[in-house]
Image: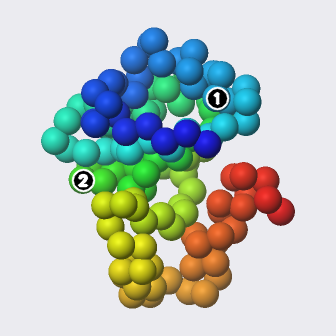
């Protein structure tokens, strides 16, 4: 897949110039992971990602930080029920230590089945590993 960080790369997720990039990634079977929902900029807002999904409903994308990072309500309103409404564990390495992030994850108290889905099953389904 491809990781894009609109805030660092300074582009709007829904910039019309990017649609061909997203279409080509989809054609090649490459999901795109977007850093999404940082309140400090407008580049990565959940609303902008939703604009792309509206134009490319079959586009396979991953909205990092549950689509919200610091925009939880916007992410819930914009992205619930879409094809990005799945949860996978990730560490945001190299910014954070994977071991510490995994410890924080287990402290959330999800069931063993929910943990299995977020730690592996959803990823395996997305990348057709099963």
Q: CA distance from mark 2 to mark 1?
A: 27 Å
Among the two numbered marks 2 and 1 on one chain, the one whose residue lies closer to the N terminus: 1
Compared to residue 70, the image places residue 120 above or below, namely below
Horizontally, residue 93 falls left or right of residue 73, namely right
Residue labelled with disc 1: 25
Return the mark for residue 98.
Answer: none
Residue 93 occupies quadrant? bottom left
Horizontally, residue 42 falls left or right of residue 6, namely left
Q: Secondary structure at mark 2?
A: loop
Residue labelled with disc 2: 70
Q: Residues within 10 Å of mark 2 (few under 14, many from 20)?
A: some
Compared to residue 109, the image places residue 105 above or below, namely above
In the picture, the quarter occupied by the N terminus is: top right
Residue at figure coordinates x 28%, y 36% from the top left? 7
Residue 85 in sight from this viewpoint? yes
Residue at figure coordinates x 31%, y 45% from the top left? 37
Q: Nearer the viewer, mark 2 or mark 1?
A: 1
Point out residue 81 in the picture as x, y percentages from the top left corner: 55, 48
Horizontally, residue 13 falls left or right of residue 32, namely left
Point out residue 77 in the picture as x, y percentages from the top left corner: 38, 45
């Amino acid at each position: 897949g491809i990781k894009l960080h609109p805030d660092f790369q300074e582009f709007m997720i829904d910039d019309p110039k990017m649609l061909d990039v997203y279409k080509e990634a989809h054609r090649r079977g490459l999901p795109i992971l977007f850093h999404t929902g940082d309140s400090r900029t407008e580049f990565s807002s959940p609303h902008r990602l939703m604009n792309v999904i509206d134009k490319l409903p079959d586009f396979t994308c991953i909205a990092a930080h549950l689509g919200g990072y610091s925009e939880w309500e916007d992410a819930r309103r914009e992205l619930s029920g879409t094809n990005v409404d799945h949860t996978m564990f990730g560490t945001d390495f190299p910014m954070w230590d994977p071991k510490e992030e995994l410890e924080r994850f287990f402290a959330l108290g999800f069931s063993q089945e929910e943990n299995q889905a977020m730690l592996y099953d959803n990823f395996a389904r997305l990348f057709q590993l099963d």
